[in-house]
Image (spheres, rainbow, N blue to C red):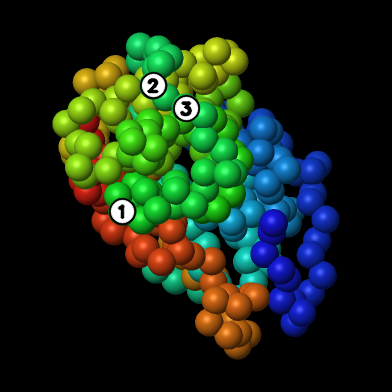
Amino acid sequence: MPHAPDPKDPPPMAPDWDTLTATDVAHPLDNPVWAALAGTHRDYAEVVGRAARYLPDANPFAALADPADPRAWADLAALVGPGREVWLTGLPTPPEGWETVRSIPGVQLDGSAVRAEADPEAVRLGPADVAEMLELVRLTEPGPFAPRTVELGTYLGIRRGGRLVAMAGERMRPPGWSEISAVCTRPDHRGEGLAGRLVRAVAAAVRERGDVPFLHAAAANTGAIRLYRSMGFVLRREPVFIGLRTPGVAPETSPGGAGADPAPPSGDAGIPVRENGFQGTGKGHTR
């Protein structure tokens, strides 16, 4: 369920669907969060004018229709509220008054040439598996994953002795594309090739509905990038994952209560972002 509103906040604005369109960018992957929220993930969007974000319990990212448009930044500030943290991806230059909290260089990899194939050992994961998935995320820190992330696409896992030991799935889904995300393996099962098998299996599900897989990784996570390139992923662009604080002073709230800052894009609310915290930290991800 979405987070409860802060009674001190103004009533939420209705989504401005007239401005939330995927055609605002030359290519969906140039602004994948906006493109996804304008399309497949519209039901997970909170929108004010030319700014949108995912429901915080599904995905921590927000987007602007045009990062060069001052009106879009004003809309994002209105959407998030004063003195709040919000995460963007791409190459945005925030206007005066916005504070950069964290900036993580990344890569965006195109999986058009990846060989996709189903895996007989992979099982579909769903809401009933979220507790196990969050436990695996806490252990391996693959990147952004929240309680409702599993709803955003196909998630597959491999179990050994009844225990979930590896998983991968889909997060952002711009038109014609699908981001493979949350690729992680328990450290005691590294070296078995589970990550690569699951990436190919998720890619097969993506291809089955006519889409193309892609993914993001932190530039510092060279081990994961080597794995993906060996599978056929190629570099498309080099975005930045940037955490910003909106202008103004946030109203006082109890820690973790309504109106508090959303958790940073990490494996779980209690895990801080690391420089290589997107698509694996090397703690049980690759191979």
The crowding category of the residue bearing disc 2, from other C-alpha atoms within 10 Å (few below 14, some 14 to 19, many at least 20), is: some
The residue sitting at 71% across, 68% down in the picture is 4
Q: Provide residue 129's location: percent of width, then percent of height.
A: 52, 43
Q: Secondary structure at mark 3?
A: strand
Q: Provide residue 185's location: percent of width, then percent of height.
A: 29, 39
Mark 3 highlights which residue? Answer: 123
Quadrant in the picture for residue 106 = top left
Q: What residue type is disc 1 on?
A: Leu
* Residue 105 visible to an observer of this rendering: no
Q: Nearer the viewer, mark 3 or mark 1?
A: 3
Can you say which quadrant of the picture contains the C terminus?
top left
Please give left or right for residue 84 compared with residue 219 in the image.
right
Q: Are marks 3 and 2 in contact (CB under 8 Å)?
A: yes
112 shown above or below 237: above
Q: What residue type is disc 3 on?
A: Val
Please give left or right for residue 27 compared with residue 76 in the image.
left
Foreground pick, 87 / 119: 119
171 shown above or below 46: above
Quadrant in the picture for residue 138 = bottom left
Mark 1 highlights which residue? Answer: 139
* Residue 123 visible to an observer of this rendering: yes
CA distance separating discs 3 and 2: 6 Å
Foreground pick, 257 / 176: 257
**Mark 3 or mark 1, earlier in chain:** 3
Q: What residue type is disc 2 on?
A: Glu
Q: Provide residue 13's location: percent of width, then percent of height.
A: 80, 61
Foreground pick, 234 / 183: 183
Query: Which numbered circle lies on residue 121?
Result: 2
